[in-house]
Amino acid sequence: MARARSKSDLPTKICPVCGLPFTWRKKWEKNWDEVKYCSERCRRRRSQAKTEDS
Ligand SMILES: [Zn+2]
């Protein structure tokens, strides 16, 4: 059972824009280190949004 691979095995990060955790995706396999936002939408929103600390 401990060997079973599940989604929880994948790395996760917290999106600074929406504050939600997001999980590694295949499309990010080459640039995961650079990924900061859960989606393109958040990435764009980041540049538009006012500075807003949680
Ligand atoms: Zn987000």
Image (cartoon, grey):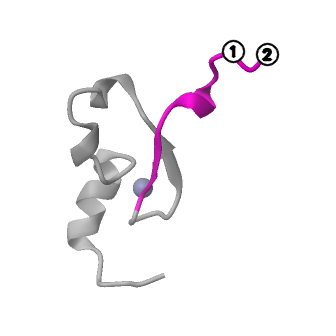
* Magenta segment main secondary structure: loop
Q: Quadrant of residue 49?
A: bottom left
> Is 17 above or below relative to 4?
below
Please identify the quadrant where the N terminus is shown: top right
Residue identified by numbered label 1:
4
Residue identified by numbered label 2:
1
Q: Nearer the viewer, residue 29 or 40?
A: 29
Q: Is residue 12 magenta?
A: yes
Q: Quadrant of residue 15?
A: bottom left
In the rendered structure, which segment of residues is drawn in magenta?
1-15
Q: Position of residue 23 (x, y in %)?
A: 48, 39
> Is 45 above or below relative to 40?
below
> Disc number at residue 45?
none
SS class, disc 2: loop
> Is 41 above or below relative to 23?
below
CB within 8 Å, label 1 to label 2: yes
Q: Position of residue 52 (x, y in %)?
A: 38, 84
Q: How many numbered marks appear? A: 2
Question: Which residue is rendered at x = 20% and y = 68% of the image?
Answer: 47
SS class, disc 1: loop
Amino acid of disc 2: Met
> Is 23 above or below relative to 9?
below
Give me the C-alpha separation between circle 1 and circle 2: 5 Å
The quadrant of the rendered image in which ligand 1 is seen is bottom left
Question: Which residue is rendered at x = 47% and y = 38% of the image?
Answer: 11
Crowdedness near tag 1: few (<14), some (14–19) or many (≥20) residues, C-alpha within 10 Å: few
